[in-house]
Amino acid sequence: MDALPRPKLKSKKPKYSRFTQQELPAWKPILTPGWVIASFVAVAILFIPAGLLCLSASERVVEIIDRYDDECLPDSYSNKGDSFIQSKDTNKTCVRTMKVPKKMTAPVFIYYQLDNFYQNHRRYVKSRSDKQLRDPGFADETRDCKPEDNLHGDENEPIIPCGLVAWSLFNDTYILSKGNKVLDINKKDIAWKSDTEIKFGSDVYPKNFQKGELIGGGELDETKPLSEQEDLIVWMRTAALPNFRKLYGKINSDLEANETITIVIQNNYNTYEFGGEKRIVLSTMSWIGGKNDFFGIAFLTIGGICLFMAINFILLYVCKPRPLGDPSYLSWNRNPSGQ
Amino acid sequence: MSLDDAQIVNVNPQQQSPDTLQNSSSHDGIQSKSWRASSVQEVGFVDFGSKSVPQGAESEGFSMSMSHREINNEDSRLVYVNDALKTNERFEFAGNSIRTAKYSVLSFLPRNLFEQFHRVAYIYFLIIAILNQLPQLAVFGRGASILPLSIVLLVTAVKDAYEDWRRHRSDRIENNRMSFVLVNDRFQQKKWKDIQVGEIIRFSANDTIPCDIVLLSTSDPTGVAYIQTINLDGESNLKTRYAKLETLSRVPEKDRMNGLIKCEKPNRNIYGFHATMEIDGKHLSLGPSNIVLRGCVLKNTNSAVGVAVYAGNETKAMLNSSGAPSKRSRLETRMNREIILLSVFLIALCTVVSVCAGVWLGRHRDDLDMLPFYRKMDYSEPVAENYNYSGFGMEILFTFLMSVIVFQIMIPISLYISMELVRVGQAYFMIRDDKMYDETSNSRFQCRALNINEDLGQIKYVFSDKTGTLTENKMEFKYASILGVDYSGEGTDFDGEQRGYCIQVNGQVWRPKMMVKVDKVLLRLSQTGNNMKANEQIYDFFLALAACNTIVPIVVDTSDPSEKLVDYQGESPDEQALVYAAAAYGFMLMERTSGHIVIDIQGERQRFNVLGMHEFDSDRKRMSVILGCPDGTVKVIVKGADSSMFKIIDKSRNLDVVRATESHLHSYSSIGLRTLVVGMRELGVPEFEQWQSSYETASTAVMGRVALLRKVAINLENNLNIVGASAIEDRLQMGVPEAIESLRKADIKVWVLTGDKQETAISIGYSSKLLTSNMSQVVINSNSKESCRKSLEDALITSRKFVVSGDPHAGGSGALIIDGTSLVYILDSELEEQLFQLANNCAVVLCCRVAPLQKAGIVALIKNRTDDMTLAIGDGANDVSMIQMADVGIGISGQEGRQAVMASDFAMGQFRFLVPLLLVHGHWNYQRMGYMILYNFYRNAVFVLVLFWYVLFTGFTLTTAVTEWSSVLYSVLYTSVPTIVVAILDKDLSRRSLLTYPQLYGAGQRQESYNAKLFWLTIADTLWQSIVVFFVPLFVYWKSDIDGSSLGDLWTLAVVFLVNVHLAMDVIRWSWISHASIWGSIIATCICVIIIDIIPMLPGYWAIFDLASKGSFWICLLGIQIAAIVPRFGIKMFIQHCKPSDIQIAREAEKFGNSMESRGAEIEMNPPRR
C-alpha cells in the first residue's frame, strides 16, 4: 500500500551540524605505555635536579636562631614570667651572644619568631579595621575591634589603630653589636611597599593607642603617620600559622664566620602567659626564601618515586605486554575457563 | 414503518475496559487498539425513527452503578441554555479566558520563590545562609553568604520568567481568538475569553472549538458533526458527534431556546461525559458523543451550533494539560545514598572541630581573659565584662554550627543544579540527533522526562508491544480466501495503464488515497459481475468489506482539479485496509451518512440502507451490520475473529469451504498476518421484523442496554454462510530485526507483550529475529491454576537445561511463550516466582493475548524481583500502564494516537531508534553523569578538607585562610563550568564503536561508572590530594614570615588548578569547548583572586603579587600538582594496562586503526554469553 504524496509538511528534521551531532573535531589522547613511561621519566628528570638545586640553595642559607624568652627571665622570676613582664620595676634588658657559623653576606635579615601565638585565631584576625588604617575619615569605624575599639568605652575616643591585632603589637627591641661596634639595623622597607603606600594612610596618626586599662604590647609614635610605622605594618600582616617569624630589620653588612654577635634585648613582650616562645633569627636569603630543606627533600622524593614508577611500568610492559585495542581482552571474548 | 424510513444513526468509537482479559485476545484483528485503555466507555446512542432513546451505558463491570446514577445536585452544574446570566448567577463558573501562565507580575516573586524552595537542596542553602546571619556565627560576610543561593535562585527565576512570558503570550493569542456567539438573538463575533458558560456558539467548518460545548444542531440533517481531535489526543482521523434530534430543528436566532443542562462537575476524563438536558419539558440524556471539547476542529460539516458547558480552565482539555511524569533516576537514588554518607563525613568533621575547640578552650580556660589573641574580658567598660563569650558550652555549639557553615559545600548542592543543566544539555543532543528523526511521521525524538536520561544507559530488560511498535501498524490487505479458494497470488502491481481503480463522478476522477496491490485473478473475477456462483461470493465478500465497518469516506482535493482522492477515515487501521482493498477491487465506498451508504460497484453506484449495526465488543469479538440492499433484500453481514466466527457459521452447508478456509487461515497467521472471517446471511421478512422490534426495544431500554443489545446481536448472528477470510499484513518496521539483534548483543532481554494470537506473535517473533530456529520453545497455555503450576514446573526442568548446557549457541537457548489466560493464574499468585525463574532461564519471552494491566503486571514481576532496569516501549493506549510501570517508558508516536506518548518519559518515531537511544545516548549519558557525580563529590570534598586541615592549626576557630569570596566562588565559578561542559560533551567512545559493539553497553548494566568501590576510591584519592594541597605549603612556610592571605591565595590556586588538572586528566575528547572551559576556569580563577587582592579594604591586599614574586610559590604550586596527581595517574595507568575495561580497549582500537576489526571478525562469530 503506497501513500500518494501528502501535502508537504514543514520538516522537523534536525539541521545537521557537527555540534548537534556531537561530532566536533576533538583530540583524543590515549596514554600509551610510551607516554606513561615518558611522563614519569619527565617528572623524574625535572624534579630530581630541581630538588638538588633547592637543597643546595637551602644549604647556602645561613641561619642563627636563639630562643631567649626563658633565658632572659631572671632566676627569681622563673615560672613567674607573667608577673616579671607585667611589673614596671623589673629590668627587662637581657644580653645574649651568638656565633656566626658561616659567612653571612649582606643583607642579613633579622626576624623575631613567635611560637604558639595564634595570630590566625578567628577572634584575633577579625579584630581590626582596615578602613580606619587607610583613611582618617573612617577613624570611628571600630565596629569589629571590640574590646579594643574605643578608649574607656567612649565612642568619641576611637582607638587608632584599633583592634586586638594592633593592640598586641610586638615590642621587644634588639641592639646587635659585633665586638664593640654596634651594627646598624635598617628598619626601613621591612614592610610591603603596597602596604606603606596604599593600605596604611600617610595621614592617619595613632590616637588613644595603648591608653586603655590593659596594655597589650608596643606603643606607637603619635607624630608619625601609620604608613611610616613599619613595625606595626609588618605585625598587622597576620601570620598564617601559629609558629611564625616577622621581619625586624636588615643588616646591610656581611657577618664573617666565627664572629660573635652580642644582642641586647629589651624583653618587653609577654608570651609567658600563654606558653609562647620567642626567638631571634638572623638569616640570609636564597631564591627559595629562608632555610628550608623540605622543598629539596620533597622534590627528590617525588622525582624518585616517579623514576621508580617509570622503571616498574617498563618492567610491567615488558613482562606482561598487552597489544593496544586487542579485542581478545574484551569481556565477552575472554574465555571463561581460561581466565 | 417501512424500511426506508428507518434510520439508524450509530457510529461511534468503541472501547473496552482494560481489565477484561478476553479483551485483548482478538480485537487486534478487528479494530484499532487506541481506545482500549480508557476505562470509561463511550456512550453510544441510537436514534430510531422519530423516537430518540438516549442511552448512557458503560462497561459491563460498573454499568449498573453508573448508568442509572442520577446526577446529584451537589455534584452537578446547571447550565441554562442561552442564558449565561442565570447560569452564572449562582455559581461563578470559570470564564473562558485561559491561563496557563503561572505567575503575574505581582505574584511572580513570592510564588516563584515558594516553588523553588520546594527543593531540599535550596532549603539547606537557605538554612546555612540564615545561620550565617546570626552575629555569633557570622563566618562569611552578609554578601558572600547569600551570593551562591541568590545566583541559583536568580538563574532559575530568569528561566521561569522567560517560560512564563511565553505562556502569557500564547495565552493572550488564544484568549483573543474570535467566535460567533448568540447575543440578543444574533450571532456576533466575540473574543474567546469573553465566552461564558450557557452561551450558544456557532462554528463553521475548520473552526477550532473555544470551550467544551454540547451540540445543539449541525448543518447535517441528521445532526452529525465530524471533528478532528488532533490537538487533544493527536489522532488525526475524524470522529463523529451528534446533536440531539430535539434540538436539531431549532434555529437559535428565531425561536429562543430555553433549556437546562445538568452535567457533571468539570473533570479530566476526555472520553466521558454524563448529563441530562431538559428542553421543552422533555428529558434528554447526553453522553460523550454529544459533547465537543475545546481544541477540536470541526471538519466536513458546514456549521454547527452548541452551548458552552465548560469554559476556560475547566474544560477537559485544560484539565488534562499536565506535565511530564516525574521519576527519579537510578543513578540519582544511588547518589543520594552517597550524599547521606557525605553528610555523615560533614558531621564528623564538625564534631572533630568542636571537640578539639572544647579541649583547647578547657586548657586555656584561665588565660582566656588576657590572651592577646582571645581577650575574653572587655575592660573598657567600668565593670569588666565578658566580651563575645557565651560560656563554654555555647562556644562549642557555636563552633559546631560555624563549622557546618564553613564546610557546607561538602554536600554538593551545586551538583543538583549541575545535573539539571547537564540533563538539559543531554536532552538537547538527543532531540537534535538526526539519526533519531523519523521521516515518515516527521517527528523528532522527544524528551518528556528530564531526570532519567542516565537510566537509558543501564537497561537490562526491554518490554515491547508488538503492533505499532515492532510493526508499522499500517495494515495492508494481503490475501483473501473466498469460498475456500485461496487468492494469495503475489500481489502484483497495477496494470501499466490503469493506476488502481477509479470512478468518474461529475466529470471528476475519484480514486482511493491508498493503492493496494491486487491479485490479478481475483481482480478479473471481481470485474466479471455476479452471475456465477463463485463470482457471487466474491461480490458478497467485497460488499462485506466495503459495508461492514465504521469507516467514513472523505473526499480530498488534489492539485489537479479534475482528480479527487477518497480518504477513508476510521478508528481502526484494519478496517481502513479492508475498505481500501475493496475499493481496489472495484467496490468503492463513496458516501456514508447516518442511514445509508453509497458504494460504487464496478462503476455502478448503489445505495444500501444501514438498518442496524451491532458494534464490536470483546465478548463476541465480531461486529455485524444489517443492510437493506437495492433489490429489497435484507442481509446481515458479520465479520470477526476466526475463533468467534466459526462458532456461528453453519458448517453443515459448506463443510469443504469451511475446512479449506480454516487451513488458509492457519497458513496466513503462521506467516504473521492478521486474519478476519466474513460471514453473511439473508434475513427473511419475519425474522427481520422480529429482530427490528427487539433491536428497538433493546436500544430504548433504560436498564442494561448493552447486555440487551448483545443478546439481540447473538440471536441474529447465527447460521451464517461463510463468505471468506481476509489476511492483513502489519509490516515490521524498518530495522526491527537488526535493532533486536543489537539489543540482544548488548545483553538486553527483549520481551514482547502483545494482544495478538499466539501464531501471529510467534511468526512476528521469527521475522523480527527475536526467535531463531535453534531455540527451543517452551509454551505455556493453561486454563487453570493447577495446570499452570504443572506446566511451569515441567518448563522449569526443561529450561534448566538451557542454563546447564551453558553454551547458548550449542543447544540453542530457550524461548518462553505464554498466553494471557495462563498469566491470569500466575500473576499475583505464588506461581509468580516460578515464572520469574523460568523467564530468567529463557533468552526470549513472548507473551500473547495479554491485557493492558497484565502488561504492567509482567513489568512489575521483573521490577520487584531484580535490581535491573526495565524499559517499556509501546504506542497504544493499552501500553500506558506498562509504560508507567517500567523504570523508563518510551512512547512510539505512531498511528495510534498519543496516549502512550503522553504517559511516556521519552517518545520517538520508530522502534529501531531504541538502538541509538540506549547504546549511544544512554551509554554516553550514564558515563557522563556517573563521572560528573563522582567528580563533584571529589571537587567539593577536597576543598572542604583543605579548609578543615587549616582549622586544626588555628586553635580550632574556623578561620579560613582562603578569602571568604573565594570559598563562596569556588563551587559557583572557579570549578563549575568545566564539569558541566565535560558532562555534556565528553564522549568515551564514538557512535560507530558503540553501535558496532553493542556489548559495550554492558558498562552501564554493570554500573561501571558509578558504584560504591569508585566512591570510596574517589574519597581516598580526595583525602590524599587534600593532604598534599594543604601540607606541602604548610611545611614549606612553617616558621616563616608568610601571612595568612598569601598562604590562602596559594591554597586557593593550588586547589583550583588541581581539580581542573584532575578533570583534564579524565577528559577523553578534547574539543575546543573543553579546552576553553577548563583552561578558561583556571584563568578566571586567577583573575578573581587578583581582583579580590587589589581591594585595599581587605586584609589580603596585594598578597597575590607579593606571593607571585617569590620562587617558592611557583615551585610549591608545581610540586602540589604533581604530588597530588601521581598516585591517581599511576593507579589509573596500572588498571588500564592490567585490567582494561571494554571501553578502554574499544577506545584504543578506535585510535589505533582497524586491528580490532580484522580480528574482531572471527570473534564476532561468537555471540555474547549471557
Image: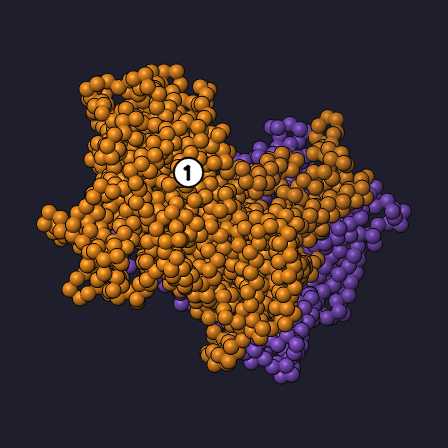
Is residue A284 among the parts visible in the rendering? Answer: no
Q: Against A118, is B221 above or below?
A: above
Q: Against A321, is B639 above or below?
A: above
Residue visible at 42% across and 52% down in the picture: B646
Is residue B58 among the parts visible in the rendering? Answer: yes
Q: Position of residue B756 (x, y in %)?
A: 45, 54
Q: Against B869, is A39 above or below?
A: below
Q: Nearer the viewer, residue A306 or B570?
A: B570
Q: Position of residue B991 (x, y in %)?
A: 44, 66
Residue visible at 75% across and 41% down in the picture: B371
The residue type indicated by label 1 comes to Arg
Q: Position of residue B136 (x, y in %)?
A: 66, 35
Residue visible at 58% across and 33% down in the picture: A140
The purple one among the chains is A
Q: Is residue B425 left or right of residue B279?
A: right
Please tell me whether mark 1 sits on a helix, a strand or a loop: helix
Image quarter of the C terminus of chain B: bottom right
Q: What residue did someone put label 1 on?
A: B710
Q: Colour of chain B?
A: orange
Q: How many marks?
A: 1
Q: Is residue A3 left or right of residue A205?
A: left
Q: Nearer the viewer, residue B970 or B914?
A: B914
Residue B837: name its quadrant: bottom right
Q: Position of residue B855 (x, y in %)?
A: 52, 50
Residue B531: name its quadrant: bottom left
Q: Is residue B176 left or right of residue A294?
A: left
Residue visible at 77% across and 59% down in the picture: A66
Q: Nearer the viewer, residue B1047 or B119?
A: B119
Chain for mark 1? B
Image quarter of the N terminus of chain B: top left
